Image (tube, rainbow, N blue to C red):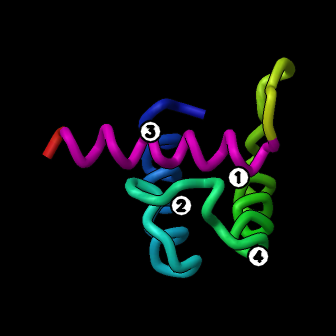
Amino acid sequence: MGAEIKNMIIDQLCQTVDGCEGFDVRTADFHALRSCQVDRLSYWAKSYGYRAPKNANGSTARYFFQLLARHANAKGSAK
């Protein structure tokens, strides 16, 4: 998958998560999320095909949340 396609998909996921899940990935704290929101993050990570690093010290949902937050913050600062 090309980098541009991945960025487009991540953009769409950020918008979907922001709109449907009730939190903003740019400002939300992962540890303050409700368990149902974390479950939905796990669902989105699985549907995207995301895999956490082998040496991950947290859940796949937490690493996916960080990926979305980094992308959203980088995109927001570029505007």
**How far apart in space, not on screen, are marks 4 and 2 (Cα)?**
17 Å
Check contact, mark 4 vs mark 1: CB within 8 A.
Answer: no
Residue type highlighted by circle 2: Leu
Residue type highlighted by circle 4: Cys
Q: Which mark is residue 68?
A: none
Which residue is disc 4 drawn over? 36
Q: Residue 56: say if magenta.
A: no
Residue type highlighted by circle 3: Arg
Which residue is disc 2 drawn over? 13
Which residue is disc 1 drawn over? 48
11 relative to 73, above or below: below
**How far apart in space, not on screen, are marks 4 and 1 (Cα)?**
18 Å
74 relative to 37, above or below: above
- Considering the whole magenta stretch, tell me its main secondary structure: helix
User: What kind of element bears circle 2?
Assistant: helix
Nearest to the observer: residue 66 or residue 51: 66
**How far apart in space, not on screen, are marks 1 and 2 (Cα)?**
9 Å
Which residue is disc 3 drawn over? 70
Residue type highlighted by circle 1: Tyr
Tell me which numbered mark, 3 or 2, is placed earlier along the sequence.
Answer: 2
Check contact, mark 1 vs mark 2: CB within 8 A.
Answer: yes
Q: Choose top left, top right, bottom left or bottom right for residue 31.
A: bottom right
